[in-house]
Image (cartoon, rainbow, N blue to C red):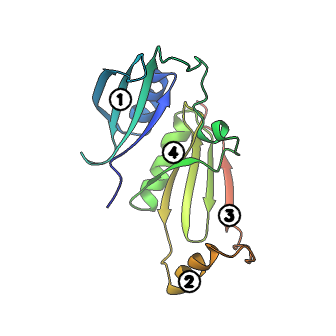
Amino acid sequence: MGYHHLALAAKDMPAIHHFYEEVMGFELVKTEVAPSPQGGWAKHFFYRMENDSTFIAFWEIHDFPGVAENFETNLSKAAGLPDHINHIAFDVADQADLDRRKKQWMDAGLDVMEIDHNWCYSIYTKDPNDNLVEFCLTTGAFTSEDREYALGALTNDDLETSKPPASMQHHPATTD
């Protein structure tokens, strides 16, 4: 079972649209417009990621009582946490797809952080909501020992730290 959609608030829908359709390659396929039960109204934009079962969606809210015009869209900042804690990670098919995505982001004027986590390989940038966005390729297999360790970590804080990333690289945006 996968998830159907992730829904987030947005302040700048034209910037969100440019990023998620033009840069990420997702397609805007549906918008719902409706009043909010608490007052005000909203537009709910759905971007198809791979098929008609997986979307990322954004709320453009209007006249919501008690909601400040300058509300925080960065999930981590809103929770008082460092940027890397709450983030959005999308999968890729293979290394070629990950490389294509990295080039796509850099060509769009975005800085990219690349990290080999030893069991997955990731690239990161920021979206117009200031959220950290990731493309991730699983490169390792999960063992019964991994599961045993994970289950133990639920109730034990006396653990060895994980192996540091095999590599970390910062790639500045491509300039023309």
| x and y percentages locating residue 120 in the rendered image | 54, 66
Of helix, strand and loop, which one carries label 1?
A: strand
The residue under label 4 is 103
The residue tagged with tag 2: helix, strand or loop? helix
User: In the orientation shown, which residue stands out farthest toward the top?
Assistant: 63
Is tag 2's residue or tag 3's residue first in the polypeptide sequence?
2
Relative to 172, is 96 on the left or the right? left
**Above or below, 136 relative to 42:** below
The residue pinned by badge 3 equals: 167
Residues under labels 4 and 2: Cα distance? Answer: 38 Å
**Position in image of residue 50 (x %, y %):** 30, 48
Q: Residue 45 carries which label?
A: 1
Crowding near the residue tagged with mark 1, few <14, some 14–19, many ≥20 C-alpha atoms within 10 Å: many
- Check if mark 3's residue and mark 4's residue have beta carbons within 8 Å: no
Amino acid type of the residue tagged 2 in the rendering:
Glu
Instruction: Please name the residue that numbered disc 2 is placed on.
Output: 148
Spatial separation of the CA atoms under disc 3 and disc 4: 18 Å
Q: In which quarter of the image is residue 41?
A: top left
Residue drawn 29% across and 26% down? 32
Q: Residues within 10 Å of mark 4 (few under 14, many from 20)?
A: some
Q: Residue 67: x and y, percent?
A: 55, 21
